[in-house]
Amino acid sequence: MSDRPFLEHFDPMGIYEVLFSFLDASGTYMGNPGTHPWAQGFPLTTQLPDGPTIPSSISFEPTDLKYPPATGGPELLEALRDYFNGFYGAHLSTDNLAVFAGGRPGIFATMSFLDPAIPFMIEETEYTPYWDLLRLMKRRYAVVASNESNRFRPEVEDYAAASASIEGDDRRFLIKSNPCNPTGVTVSGEDLKTVVDYWSQPGHGAIFDEAYEFFHSPSPVSALAFVEDIDETDVFVVGAATKGLQTPGLRTGWVVASKSNIEIFRNYSSFGMGGVARPSQLCVADMLQRDRVQQARAAVGTFYGEQRAKYAAGLSAAGIELFTGDGGFYHWGRLPGGLGAREFNTRLFKHKAAILPGTLCDMFRRGDEGPHRDFIRFSFGPMEPETYDENMEIITSCL
Ligand SMILES: Cc1ncc(COP(=O)(O)O)c(C=O)c1O
């Protein structure tokens, strides 16, 4: 091996920092039995009240073991097309869809093929890996204020100010999680229509990351309800079976885009991905059948809506000032008395518990010098309802 590394070093995304310090302090992996993984973003993978059964086997034939088609097998593409057309009145054909091994690979592919000259716009408080991806790909980006001053709900003026700060190129590309991870703030209804119309214009494009589509109260939301003709846009709607269908382990996600953009993904798959595991695709296609998915949307929305409300009451009573919106399975709030999120975690580790420090959602990455120092993202995604009292006791004692 040579003295100088052949691979350029790149750190894992921020949450791993928490996972490693958790392991050091508690001697066990976060997520193992007996731990309280409030830092982690996975849903329960068990049946929810009034929810559909969760698959426990997948059957396939020897022919299913052949290479899958580059952008997805017909069963899943058709199921996705019918899902979006049926629930949101979209006008998609299967040529508007590409299947990836989860949501992140779809985001990664979209960003990789975007013309490097196009500047990104991103809200100040966003999903951790966007920052890693922008850095890895050396992309230029302008940050839209999303902080306490606007209660993490950026307005048109905040967008206009960020856009005006960009020099040299008139084009703009938005990357946005909706519902937002970590804040749960969700743009819906007429506001979402305005946003979609704006980013659908020529010279504009966007990734709407809808990983938490089902987790919005009172009902799921998608930008696809407002995209008139996706073939006329550079809009990319990203989704995954990960959260809503409660199957992170199936590693199945998708991107909805214009036919010409999907063709780029097909070409990419031919040399860089080779398609996605067919057994996973078959399983997800079954889970998207109309009645089952309808039941899943209702059960996920109700269950997690109740958990959101219950934890909102508990965390607020414990003194945490919440800024959470109506979506996702996180609470976003500020610790009382100037307590920093890192110090809070040091206390929580003794109880085999951890939160995600808000600094990891800061798209300026200012660390503890920045305004996110005493903000936390508390995940109730993996929490069984009966752990509520114990969870609240730990939190209260560590405050
Ligand atoms: C905002 C957001 N987008 C996308 C994903 C995609 O997850 P995956 O790549 O596991 O499907 C996640 C999961 O944490 C997420 O929070």
Image (cartoon, grey):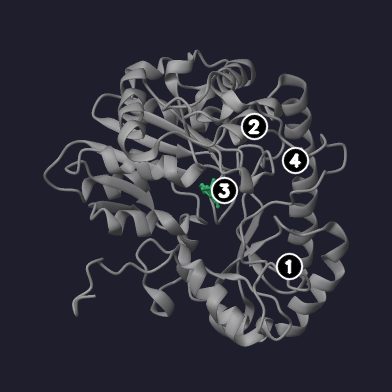
- Going from N to C along the chain, the mark reached first, 3 or 1, is 3
- Going from N to C along the chain, the mark reached first, 2 or 3, is 3
Q: Is mark 2 within 8 Å of ligand 1?
A: no
The residue lying furthest to the left in this view is: 168
Let me know if residue 327 appears in the view.
no
- Going from N to C along the chain, the mark reached first, 1 or 2, is 2
Which one is nearer the viewer's eye here, 335 or 359? 359
List the residue tagged with mark 3: 185
- Going from N to C along the chain, the mark reached first, 1 or 4, is 4
Residue 346, percent from left and from top: 61, 85
- Tag 4, which secondary structure? helix
Residue 396 placement: quadrant: bottom right
List the residue tagged with mark 1: 315
Distance from disc 3 to disc 1, alpha carbons, whole Å, reads 17 Å
- Going from N to C along the chain, the mark reached first, 4 or 2, is 2
Quadrant of the image for the C terminus? bottom right
Return the mark for residue 100: none
List the residue tagged with mark 4: 300
Distance from disc 1 to disc 4, alpha carbons, whole Å, reads 22 Å
Distance from disc 1 to disc 2, alpha carbons, whole Å, reads 35 Å
Residue depicted at 54% across the width and 37% down the height = 277
Mark 1 belongs to which amino acid?
Answer: Leu
Return the mark for residue 284: 2
Asked if the residue under mark 2 is in contact with the one under mark 1, i.e. CB atoms within 8 Å, the reply is no
- Tag 2, which secondary structure? helix
Residue 261, percent from left and from top: 32, 25
Mark 4 belongs to which amino acid?
Answer: Val
Q: Nearer the viewer, mark 4 or mark 2?
A: 2
